[in-house]
Image (cartoon, helix red, strand yellow):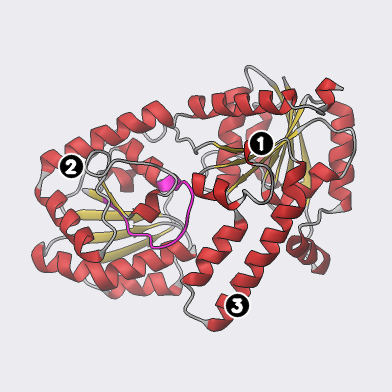
Amino acid sequence: MKILLVSEMIPCLPSHDGFRLIPANLIRSLYQRHEIHLVALSGEGSEKQSGWPRAYCKSVSIFRTHHGGRARLRALTGAVDPLLVRFVRDAVARVEPDLLHLEGGGLAALVHSSVGWPPAVLCVHDSKALRYREFAQYSARATARFRLRLFSLLARHQERRWFRYAGRVVVTSPSDAEALSGATSAERIAVIPNGVDLEYFAYRPVPETGRIVFTGNMSWPPNEDAAEHFVRDIMPSIRSRIPDASFWIVGADPSQRVRNLANTPGVHVTGTVADIRPWIWSASIYASPLRFGLGVKNKILEAMACGAPIVATSRSLSGTPLIDGRHAMIPDDDAKFIESLVRLLDEPALRESLSREARRKVEAENSWASVATQYEGIYRDALAQPGSTRNR
């Protein structure tokens, strides 16, 4: 199969950004069986990342994006840059692909931009309308809540306007599939979970006594809220029962709110780290106290792969169905969260059991080879769909 993959970002590895990580791993998993051509959008200064996909793609074309009033207006309306339409149209004419893979909801309008293009699979990962609505519920400021609800309405309008033109729409969790049910027919929506690199995130637990680790981009609102909530409402009880327990907040771009948490005894904020894996391996417990945010969390898959025993809210696992007490401890109120942490810190045998069962689960369900096979099935479905150019 000849695939033209159009991505809102340049795919590259290693990366923790889903819009780089997912297409990069798909490219790496599929290139030996399919001919892949890449069109990637890039802002000024980021084209240096284009070296990575050139090792796997038959051709790589970079479209330079520009910021400004028109770009912001297009982002609000879901419209697409006419220059990008022309750029992709030229790539379609040059490559003559069997299929378009569009990586990112901002590209949805491309599907309706030209008659006669091959069928398109639109990979959006999540519903922006649902995400903004979730964020609004947990925003403390009235102005922020209003803005986020407005963004949610605009995103819902975009989803309903453009998504119906895609042969298939791919999301990573059932909640996002349900949120998009009004945007296109249910049979066109596919749920494919994220994968994890099982070799890179090797099973290698080397825990530090009493160390509780939480990872992620620490300017992302759900992570910021979770870190602050843990330090304020959970950590004092843990320290009163296990005085040498420590909480490590590990990840890029910590906000001022997160940085201030390092003033609390037993709490450490690392900021950006060169390699996240040693921090996960060092965890006696990997904690994810998220209170909002949906979809598959890459950090949960990474912790499972690395062998860190997990205590997480069900919201942290909304796109990753785990069994409480087998793969992780899944408490949803503070008292149960505290009891789960204390119990695990006291019971190494239980930590070992959770660690091994979680690793077995990601090996069985979340290898990138397995995920890529599911995408291939979606590609075939899109090509077989009545009205696709392959069938004309």
As drawn, the residue found furthest toward the bottom would be 142
Mark in front: 3 vs 1: 3
Left or right of residue 292, residue 45 in this image: right
- Figure check: 128 above or below 388: below
Magenta part, dominant SS: loop
**What is the distance, in whole Å, between disc 2 and disc 3 at their CAs?**
43 Å
Question: In the rendering, at what x and y percent does residue 237 appear?
Answer: 16, 68
Q: Residue at x 62, y 18 (%)?
A: 32
Look at label 3 and name its amino acid: Phe
Q: Residue at x 56, y 33 (%)?
A: 25
Part of the protein shown in magenta:
286-299
CB atoms of marks 1 and 2 within 8 Å: no
Tell me, yes or no, if residue 239 can be seen here: yes
Look at label 1 and name its amino acid: Gly
At label 2, counting other C-alpha atoms closer than 10 Å, the crowd grade (few under 14, some 14-19, many 20 or more) is: many
- 183 or 148: nearer the viewer: 183
**What residue is pinned by disc 1?**
51
Look at label 2 and name its amino acid: Arg
Q: Which mark is residue 33?
A: none
Of callouts 1 and 2, which one flags the residue occurring earlier in the amino acid sequence?
1
Q: Looking at the rendering, which quadrant does residue 70 occupy?
A: bottom right
**What residue is pinned by disc 3?**
146
- 27 or 268: nearer the viewer: 27
CB atoms of marks 3 and 1 within 8 Å: no
**What is the distance, in whole Å, between disc 1 and disc 2 at their CAs?**
41 Å
- 95 or 108: nearer the viewer: 108
Is residue 295 one of those drawn in magenta? Answer: yes
**What residue is pinned by disc 2?**
351
